[in-house]
Image (cartoon, rainbow, N blue to C red):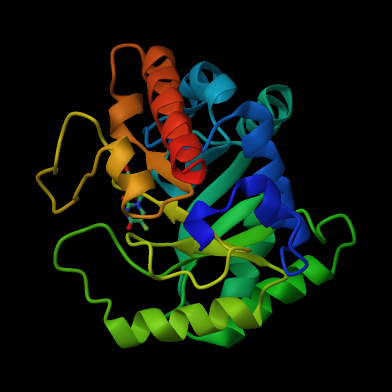
């Protein structure tokens, strides 16, 4: 099964896309399957936290529209740090509109973010819009990828079993750009060539006051099937974000090793 296979083996599968291979390779090089959600409110904090957690992460996840003061220079600094510390940048935009609109939005994001998230609500044509943006530029081919939201971590969300099934189908139709699914359980992703990204991870809390549900690093990797775990406030709001990132990184990676070695 997918969860028993190592990232190395999965990266060598014929159906694994170039950009997915790049992610697998990066996790193995850094021994990190930690994605940090830098949910802060200013550009200065964004760069400050990124500098601190950079050495420990495979992906840095942003909600750039929630951060004030972000300029071209901010995005350039972010890209430089991504190079320096060897991580990918993902804009958690959760695009959800018709193909043409999504294409316009993605034209901006594609310049600085390696990865982007989308909702499948509008169906496959939206993915086609993204594919067109990527195919227009030779340098982007194989260097840009999409995570599709199949499940949400929050209480009371409206996603149904049927919606999840249809979402998986779409992900398989656009395998050249879809690197994986954002989901909460190990039975959503059928193919070892796709990555399970799972948010809602925290060692100290089990929920927040607005419906977020947390699991600890062991559970999320061992029983919920996450390949890469997303941690936000557990790291960003810690007194020492670098130490916290290191702790989460080691716990998550050791659990992944445990999962694939028995
Ligand atoms: F798709 C999802 C989801 O189902 N749950 C999430 O929490 C995305 N997220 C994001 O992960 C959310 O928008 C935050 O950026 C992050 C979780 O942050 P936390 O501080 O660890 O709760």
Q: Percent from the top left, x then y, of residue 179?
A: 61, 61
Q: Residue at x 21, y 69 (%)?
A: 157
Q: Is residue 78 left or right of residue 61?
A: right
Q: Percent from the top left, x then y, of residue 239?
A: 29, 12
Q: Residue at x 71, y 53 (%)?
A: 11
Image quarter for residue 208?
top left
Q: Can residue 83 be seen in this snapshot? A: yes
Q: Residue at x 51, y 45 (%)?
A: 260
Q: Residue at x 56, y 76 (%)?
A: 171
**Residue lying farthest right?**
138
Does residue 69 lie above or below 227 as drawn? above
Does residue 244 lie above or below 98 as drawn? above
**Residue lying farthest left?**
209
Q: Is residue 168 left or right of residue 211?
A: right
Image quarter for residue 207?
top left
9 or 250, nearer to the observer:
9
Q: Percent from the top left, x then y, of residue 46?
A: 48, 28
23 or 83, nearer to the observer:
23
Q: Percent from the top left, x then y, of residue 144?
A: 71, 57
Q: Is residue 174 left or right of residue 164?
A: right
Tally of numbered tags: 0
Q: Is residue 207 left or right of residue 89?
A: left
Q: Can residue 99 be seen in this snapshot? A: no
């Amino acid at each position: 099964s997918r969860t028993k296979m190592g990232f190395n083996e999965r990266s060598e599968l014929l159906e694994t896309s170039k950009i997915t291979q790049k992610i697998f390779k990066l996790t193995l090089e850094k021994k990190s399957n930690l994605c940090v959600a830098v949910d802060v409110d200013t550009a200065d904090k964004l760069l400050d936290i990124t500098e601190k957690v950079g050495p420990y992460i495979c992906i840095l996840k942003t909600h750039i529209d929630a951060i004030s003061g972000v300029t071209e220079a901010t995005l350039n600094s972010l890209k430089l740090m991504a190079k320096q510390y060897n991580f990918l940048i993902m804009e958690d935009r959760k695009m959800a509109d018709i193909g043409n609109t999504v294409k316009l939005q993605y034209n901006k994001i594609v310049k600085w973010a390696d990865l982007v998230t989308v909702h499948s609500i509008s169906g496959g044509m939206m993915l086609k819009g993204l594919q067109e943006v990527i195919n227009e530029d030779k340098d982007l081919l194989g260097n840009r990828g999409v995570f599709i939201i199949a499940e949400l971590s929050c209480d009371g969300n409206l996603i149904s079993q049927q919606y999840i099934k249809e979402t998986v189908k779409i992900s398989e139709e656009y395998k050249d750009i879809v690197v994986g699914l954002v989901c909460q359980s190990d039975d959503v992703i059928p193919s070892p060539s796709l990555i399970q990204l799972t948010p809602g991870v925290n060692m100290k809390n089990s929920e927040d006051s607005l419906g977020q549900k947390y699991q600890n690093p062991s559970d999320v990797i061992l029983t919920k099937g996450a390949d890469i775990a997303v941690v936000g406030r557990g790291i960003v709001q810690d007194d020492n974000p670098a130490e916290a990132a290191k702790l989460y990184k080691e716990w998550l990676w050791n659990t992944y090793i445990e999962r694939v070695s028995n």
